[in-house]
Image (tube, rainbow, N blue to C red):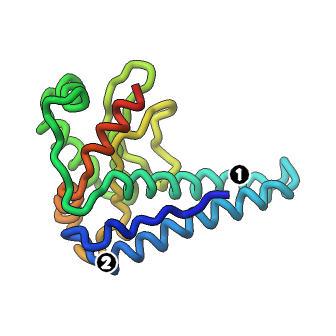
Amino acid sequence: MYEAKNFERLLGTPGFSDVLLRNHFTLYEGYVSNTNKLIEMLKTAEAGTPQWSELKRRFGWEWSGMRLHEFYFDNMIKGGSTLDKKNIFAKKIEEDFGSCEAWEKDFRATGAMRGIGWAILARDTETGRLFNVWINEHDVGHLAGATIILVMDVFEHAFALDYGIKRADYISVFWNAIDWKVVTARFVAGK
């Protein structure tokens, strides 16, 4: 069974109210709980039935919601950090996007797209190529076989309480809370 991780270390992060963060943690805990419930329900459901099929479909939604939130909270740190533009990760960004600034502009624009979902920096495990992608509804838009490097939640629950419909303001605050050591470590581990 999966256990919800504790992300209270993020309370007090500039630009994120504690109420917003606590609400978000509770939402995440729901994904963990529902993932566990579905695992148990699938043990006794009759394979091939419509009920079993719907449980299988729902499992991807709940599991991906759980994991994407863990990636998101894990790649944040109170006060943020600075990307070392001389490390191997920054060099790969420059190779694939032309510059770190061009990559950042593209990532922010991905997150600012209309709709609900996630902005993700993913790495193709076959070629090593980096892509900024949009994941819709947790389970639609993942690049098969890609490694997740950076995650930004752009569902309204991630920002609306503090920023209303000003998604760009939230994206700027999120950018200032990224833990580049974690993001770089994901890149290095995904080689």
User: How many residues crowd mark 2 within 10 Å: few (<14), some (14–19), many (20+)?
Assistant: some
Look at the image and tell me in which quarter the C terminus lies: top left
Cα–Cα span, label 2 and label 1: 35 Å
- The mark nearer the N terminus, 2 or 1, is 2
Q: Secondary structure at mark 2?
A: helix
- Judge by depth and name the residue closer to the eye, 75 or 105: 75
Q: Position of residue 159 (x, y in %)?
A: 29, 69
Q: Looking at the image, can residue 181 be seen?
A: yes
Q: Amino acid at mark 2?
A: Asp
- Judge by depth and name the residue closer to the eye, 2 or 61: 2
Q: Is residue 59 left or right of residue 187?
A: right
User: How many residues crowd mark 1 within 10 Å: few (<14), some (14–19), many (20+)?
Assistant: some
Residue drawn 27% across the image and 58% down it: 77
Q: Looking at the image, can residue 164 be seen?
A: no
Q: Position of residue 190 (x, y in %)?
A: 41, 30
- Residue identifier under label 2: 18
In the image, is residue 2 above or below residue 109?
below
Q: Quadrant of residue 22?
A: bottom left
In the image, is residue 135 above or below residue 26?
above
Q: Quadrant of residue 52?
A: bottom right
Q: Is residue 171 left or right of residue 41?
A: left
Q: Position of residue 64 (x, y in %)?
A: 53, 52
Q: Secondary structure at mark 1?
A: helix
Q: Quadrant of residue 14?
A: bottom left
Residue drawn 35% across the image and 44% down it: 120
- Residue identifier under label 1: 56
Q: Amino acid at mark 1?
A: Lys
